Image (cartoon, rainbow, N blue to C red):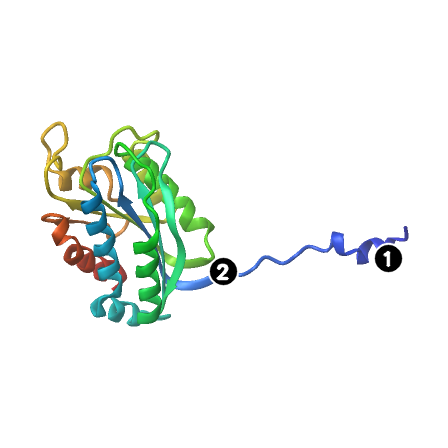
Amino acid sequence: MHRRALLASPALIATPAIAQERLDLLLVLAMDASGSIDADEFALQREGYAEALTHPSVLAAIASKPRGAIGVAMLEWGSPGGSALVVDWMRIAGSADAQRVADALIAAPRSPQSWNAIGDAIHHASHILREGPFTADQLVIDVSGDGPDSRSIRPAPVARDIVVRRGMVVNALAIAGPGSLTRAGEPLAEHYRRDVMGGPGAFVMEAENRRDLARALRAKLIREIA
């Protein structure tokens, strides 16, 4: 075969990479689906996320950003090494988008989880942030739960430190209630501040109970976005 034919062969022509759309923020919502969460509590969490994402204050915060759009994905955590992506990346740039995300959250089947492997969830979330169809300067992992990290293959402080070095931020929401203290009797919010949150501007917020979750999530999302 002539050299000119080789150069013209389609098999030898590199396919250009598809450019990722740039948004203002990429947010992975990491929700507790461990064994401590019964069916009613699970539904309250899903509904709390859906309500928060569609709230006018959250939509106003999104609209105030330079591009007026964020990307959201949701994973559920619990089992060591077993966190599951239940809603893949979706773009929110207005109320219709937000409602589609909320509907997807409510409709997604619950993943089988046990224990409280928060560190493994942070590790998984970091890959979701890097491998999706969007890019952004702000990369945030948003962990909510009612218990401390336990049984992680990668303990939460280790996973947290790795993702912070990669330019990501980990925020957390501690849900108060039975079992929300660590084995050492430490308040859950303090455990999250020490072992889970990390990165520039990282913070922990508290919900008094699961019925307070929508309010706490709404305040948390506004702070993360705006």
Q: Are marks 1 and 2 in contact (CB under 8 Å)?
A: no
* Structural distance between the alpha carbons of marks 1 and 2: 34 Å
Q: Earlier in the sequence, mark 1 or mark 2?
A: 1
Task: State the count of labels.
Answer: 2
Counting from the top left corner in percent of width and height, residue 19 is at: 53, 61
Q: Residue at x 28, y 33 (%)?
A: 114
Q: Nearer the viewer, mark 1 or mark 2?
A: 2
Q: Amino acid at mark 1?
A: Arg
Crowding at mark 2 (Cα within 10 Å: few <14, some 14-19, many 20+)? few
| Residue 94 showing in the rendered view | no
Q: Residue at x 44, y 63 (%)?
A: 22
At numbered mark 1, what does the secondary structure look like: helix, strand or loop?
helix
At numbered mark 2, what does the secondary structure look like: helix, strand or loop?
loop
Residue assigned mark 2: 20
Q: Residue furthest right?
A: 2
Residue assigned mark 1: 4
In this view of the protein, which residue sits in the foreground, 117 or 224? 117
Q: Is residue 107 above or below residue 62?
A: above
Q: Residue at x 80, y 55 (%)?
A: 9
Crowding at mark 1 (Cα within 10 Å: few <14, some 14-19, many 20+)? few
Q: Is residue 44 left or right of residue 162?
A: left
Counting from the top left corner in percent of width and height, residue 74 is at: 34, 51
In this view of the protein, which residue sits in the foreground, 82 or 131? 82
Q: Is residue 208 left or right of residue 91?
A: left
Q: Quadrant of residue 153?
A: top left
Q: Amino acid at mark 2?
A: Gln
Counting from the top left corner in percent of width and height, residue 118 is at: 28, 37
Q: Residue at x 72, y 55 (%)?
A: 13
* Image quarter in which the C terminus is found: bottom left
